[in-house]
Image: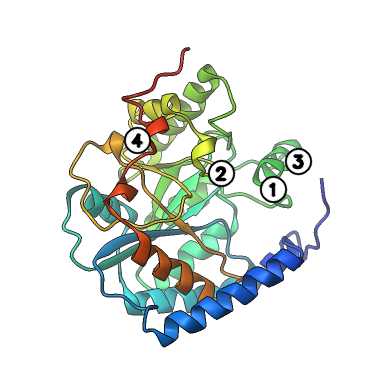
């Protein structure tokens, strides 16, 4: 596994994970230019009614101030709601104002810091965790988990941490039992990963149990896995595919695919502003739907 610089077992900033590249520098230049153009055109702030879900994987110690700036900016422009309320608005409506909610994937230890910061602002988020990893301390489990995440080895949330997050008003969602790619493992393994996750979290959760699949692209899941998610009892399913929701879905939960915009707290605030503004402009009713090849009612995978 690649070695990364750490201090007291923790990474300090995102720049320690991602090395600078020509592609990265070009991307930053493009985002700066887009931000300037959109700001000049008054397109960074829109009053268009919609629900936007944003998520991150971590807020490292060196990223806390950047994270606070992001939270303060979105609180100026949006009505920030809980994850369950955001899902309800997409399902049933009304979508009559700019709404946003936050979620965090993987269950790393720094999520406790995130939860405490959000509580200062009166914000409820959803933390998607892998119950089979919660509380893990043995090196073999943590190394394997870090390899699946593509990150350095880091501490993970304990069940006591999760209890504290819930006491702060946050929700706990499922992210498979051990962070597996649902598009690559056997159907039996898919069932186990999903149903074990729901059974553990239902017993500990104080709110509806939501699901977000690892890696989050449409190539990382199939129609059979989507069926299992709702068959297990989860009340929603979220991707990591960019987009937002402008029309109430008005249909069953299984046919709704939540779009989420990823952000990195260690990156400039303008990155978040550009992506959220672009998705506000480009979204449509179709963003509520699964791609046709993932519509569980149209396609079945043999077991």
Direction from residue 203 to residue 266 in the image, left or right: right
Asked if the residue at tag 3 contacts the one at tag 1, i.e. Cβ–Cβ closer than 8 Å, the answer is no
* Coordinates of residue 123 in the picture (x, y in percent): 36, 67
Label ID, residue 234: 4
For label 4, the SS is loop
Q: Residue at x 59, y 28 (%)?
A: 184
Q: CA distance from mark 1 to mark 3?
A: 16 Å
Write down the residue under mark 3: 139
Q: Nearer the viewer, mark 3 or mark 4?
A: 4
Write down the residue under mark 1: 150
In the rendered image, the vertical position of residue 167 relative to residue 77, given as above or below: above
Q: CA distance from mark 2 to mark 4?
A: 18 Å
In the rendered image, the vertical position of residue 117 relative to residue 175, given as above or below: below
Residue 141 is drawn in which quadrant?
top right
Crowd class of label 1 (few under 14; some 14 to 19; many from 20; radius 10 Å): few
Crowd class of label 2 (few under 14; some 14 to 19; many from 20; radius 10 Å): many
Write down the residue under mark 2: 215
Q: Residue at x 69, y 52 (%)?
A: 154
Residue 230 is drawn in which quadrant?
top left
Numbered disc total: 4
- State which tag comes first along the sequence, 2 or 4: 2
Report the front residue among 55 and 205. Answer: 55
Q: CA distance from mark 2 to mark 3?
A: 23 Å
């Amino acid at each position: 596994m690649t070695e990364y610089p750490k201090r007291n077992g923790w990474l300090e900033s995102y720049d320690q994970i991602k090395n600078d590249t020509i592609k990265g520098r070009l991307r930053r230049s493009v985002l700066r230019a887009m931000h300037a153009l959109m700001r000049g055109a008054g397109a960074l702030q829109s009053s268009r009614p919609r629900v936007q879900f944003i998520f991150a994987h971590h807020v490292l110690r060196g990223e806390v101030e950047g994270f606070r700036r992001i939270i303060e900016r979105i609180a100026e422009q949006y009505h920030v709601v809980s994850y369950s309320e955001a899902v309800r608005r997409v399902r049933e409506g009304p979508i009559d104002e700019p709404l946003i909610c936050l979620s965090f994937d993987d269950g790393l230890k720094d999520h406790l810091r995130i939860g405490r910061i959000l509580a200062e602002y009166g914000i409820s988020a959803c933390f998607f965790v892998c119950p089979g990893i919660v509380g893990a301390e043995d090196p073999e489990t943590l190394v394997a988990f870090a390899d699946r995440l593509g990150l350095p080895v880091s501490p993970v949330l304990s069940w006591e941490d999760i209890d504290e997050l819930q006491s702060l008003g946050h929700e706990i969602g499922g992210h498979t039992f051990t962070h597996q790619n649902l598009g690559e493992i056997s159907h039996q393994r898919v069932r186990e990963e999903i149903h074990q996750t729901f059974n553990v979290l239902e017993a500990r959760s104080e709110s509806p149990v939501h699901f977000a699949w690892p890696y989050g692209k449409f190539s990382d899941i199939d129609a059979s896995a989507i069926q299992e998610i709702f068959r297990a009892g989860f009340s929603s399913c979220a991707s990591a595919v960019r987009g937002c929701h402008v029309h109430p879905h008005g249909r069953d939960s299984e046919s709704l695919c939540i779009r989420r915009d990823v952000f990195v707290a260690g990156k400039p605030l303008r990155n978040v502003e550009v992506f959220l503004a672009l998705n506000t402009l480009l979204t449509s009713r179709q963003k509520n739907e699964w791609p046709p090849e993932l519509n569980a009612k149209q396609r079945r995978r043999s077991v």
